[in-house]
Amino acid sequence: MKYDYLIVGAGLYGSAFAQQMTQAGKRCLVIDRRPHIGGNVHCENVEGILVHRYGAHIFHTSDREVWDYVNRYVSFNNYINSPVAIYHGELYNMPFNMNTFSKLWGVTTPAQAQEELRRQTERHAIEEPKNLEEQALKLVGEDIYQKLIKGYTEKQWGRDCKDLPAFIIRRLPLRFVYDNNYFTDRYQGIPEEGYDALVEKLLEGSDLLLSTDYKAFVEEHPHIAEKTVYTGTIDGFFDCCFGPLEYRSLRFEDEVLDCPNYQGNAVVNYTAREVPYTRIIEHKHFNFGTQEKTVITREYPAQWKPGMEPYYPVNDEKNQALYERYRELAKSRPEVRFGGRLGAYRYYDMDKVLRAALDDARQELESL
């Protein structure tokens, strides 16, 4: 055994786990099938602009330990996520707040906004929502649903809202203040040098192999490490023996524009169903860039198929039951720890990924 741990995936989970292990004196080899570190938080320099290659990633947390942890390695700027939404030429602030309500209904006070919401939700009198559409109408009424939820959600999931389960939007944040900050967490920002700088620091002390397929590698090196930390798809690890889990994927279309400012905001959502993309990201605004050119990315949701990048687990009842079968099967491989978004088959914010990695690493060290 050359290493104590083979860590599959150089994203946030694998990198933080490796950092904790190397700090404890363990030998780690980190491999990744992609040609770069960082997983989905990878940033690429284009025209002097740090482009978030796999979609917008804004770090936010109320976990002081996690915030202090990442700040040991990189400096964060003071970016505040304040997306806007466009529906047939009408622009609305997100999340749903007093600026949104004022634009929709001409109201100016919280009491007026709450009264209009009450009037709209009571109009439908839905007691037990049977699908996402009914759930949204029960929570926010017709106007917000039709203009800001319906089309965007149907594009995200590739299905009509009437065919989506209600639990997807158990609640919708309604804020009766004129504050466009999307997140309510205490800490927020983006690494000034990009996320790769953070991951590179976390991987110091570990050996690293990129463009490396896990199964081909372990077939050639079956005794490379005593234990494995696996952050790929849990169903893929077991060759989908019970059948494949479902995911949603994304497609990105980049464009370099010869202008200093295309849309005036880092993230603009397009909520109309007939617009094929869900949002346009203008990357320079994440770091308050002043470059003469700009880079935009149109983000298109896509039906996932084998060979495509799995971005979002489809955590409905059927898939959750299938995941439980794989999780039970994983107990037969005690030398393998499954972690991260794909290994745990759940959507994680970045701070939650790091929290899970730190907690799992401590549990691992305590068990030795």
Image (cartoon, rainbow, N blue to C red):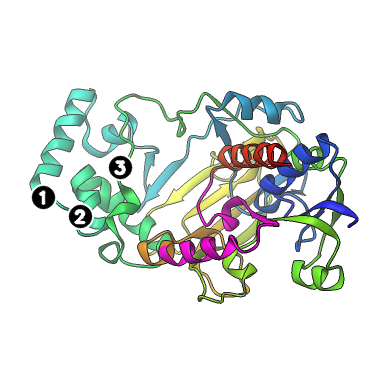
> In terms of image quadrants, where is residue 15?
top right
Could you tell me which secondary element the residue under label 2 belongs to? helix
Circle 3 sits on which residue? 171
Residue nearer the viewer, 104 or 348: 348
Task: Give whichever of discs 3 and 2 has the lower sequence position.
Answer: 2
Disc 3 from disc 2: Cα separation: 12 Å
Q: Identify which residue is drawn at 76% across, 59% down.
A: 32
Q: Identify which residue is drawn at 40% across, 48% down.
A: 86
Disc 2 from disc 1: Cα separation: 9 Å
**Residue 333 shown in magenta:** yes
Circle 1 sits on which residue? 124
Circle 2 sits on which residue? 134
Residue 152's spot in the image, x, y percent?
A: 38, 56
The answer to whether the residue labelled 2 contacts the one labelled 1, judged by CB atoms less than 8 Å apart, is: yes
Residue 67's spot in the image, x, y percent?
A: 63, 27
Q: Is residue 347 above or below residue 329?
A: above
Task: Give whichever of discs 3 and 1 has the lower sequence position.
Answer: 1
Q: The C terminus is located in which quarter?
A: top right
The residue positioned farthest toward the right in the image shown: 2
Residue nearer the viewer, 77 or 341: 341
> In terms of image quadrants, where is residue 84?
top left
Task: Give whichever of discs 2 and 1 has the lower sequence position.
Answer: 1
Could you tell me which secondary element the residue under label 1 belongs to? helix
Magenta part of the chain: 321-348
Q: Amino acid at mark 2?
A: Glu
Could you tell me which secondary element the residue under label 3 belongs to? loop
